[in-house]
Amino acid sequence: MKIEWIGHACFRLTAQDGTVAITDPYDESVGIDMVPLHADMITMSHEHHDHNETCMIAGKPVIARGAQAADVGGVRVRALASYHDDVQGAKRGANAIRLFEIDGLKIVHMGDQGCMPDDGAIDAIFGADVMMIPVGGTYTVDAQGAKAIIEKAQPACVIPMHVKTKRCPYPIASVDDFLRLMGAQDAQPVGVLEITERSAPQGVVLMQPQADEL
């Protein structure tokens, strides 16, 4: 499969059979242009405008919102209930952690995770091949909170997201604090991550968003 970071919390996941899933597409308020995208599936972690904008995505995708699961071509996904804050949703509501099965790989998209997931969610995502996790703070867990989740869930590979980039106006941190905390200061951004069951990377992978600059 192939992973590409579009920007913010939006990724394009492409299975070997060509099935394309787009996660958390954003609107113009993010300050980052949306590149032209076509999808067979769209998943949303929650219904905030920077995570649920579909008008720029071509095709006739199946859309999985909230707790909805979906199964299209080579991509299967389910949702794990969690929260957008650390007070059980009282500030920002619910968040759906997305657990994908693609080409024999376990891929986790944490959405706008705002707290340590409960034990049931941790058990479900434990040992993922890839975890995409917010690290920018303010609206989600920060670098330290992300590290705590990673230590408990033990994914093989971690991709930081939902961080301050050159055109993003949100008051969130850059990826630098997270990289320092994880001992990955020398990580060089990659545009595309191609993985198989036999070639999943280890540790932090810094991706270059297609629609912005770090």
Image (spheres, rainbow, N blue to C red):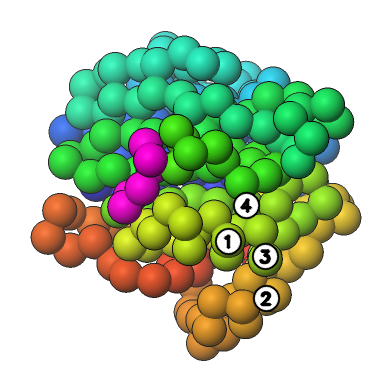
The residue stretch that appears in magenta: 123-128
Q: Which mark is residue 134?
A: 4
Q: CA distance from mark 1 to mark 4?
A: 12 Å
**Residue 195, position in %: x, y?**
23, 57
Q: Which mark is residue 148?
A: 1
Helix, strand or loop for disc 4: strand
At horizontal 60% and vertical 21% (from top left) the residue drawn is 54
What SS does tag 2 mark?
helix
Q: Residue at x 57, y 64 (%)?
A: 147
Residue type at the position of mark 3: Ala
Q: Position of residue 55 (x, y in %)?
A: 62, 19
| Relative depth, front residue between 90 and 202 | 90
Q: Nearer the viewer, mark 1 or mark 4?
A: 1
Q: Which of the two discs, 1 and 4, labels the residue nearer the N terminus? A: 4
Which disc, if any, is residue 176? 2
Q: Kindly indicate whether the residue at mark 4 contacts the one at mark 1 (C-beta within 8 angstroms).
A: no
The residue indicated by pointer 3 is: 143
Whether 196 is drawn above or below 93: the answer is below
* Mark 2 vs mark 3, CA separation in Å: 9 Å
Q: Amino acid at mark 1?
A: Ala
Secondary structure, mark 1, is helix
- Mark 2 or 1, which is nearer the eye? 1
Q: Looking at the picture, tell me which residue is in the foreground, 102 or 90.
A: 90
- Amino acid tagged 2: Asp
Instruction: Please state, as top left, top right, bottom left or bottom right, where the C terminus lies in the image.
Output: bottom right
The question of residue 90 being in magenta is answered with: no
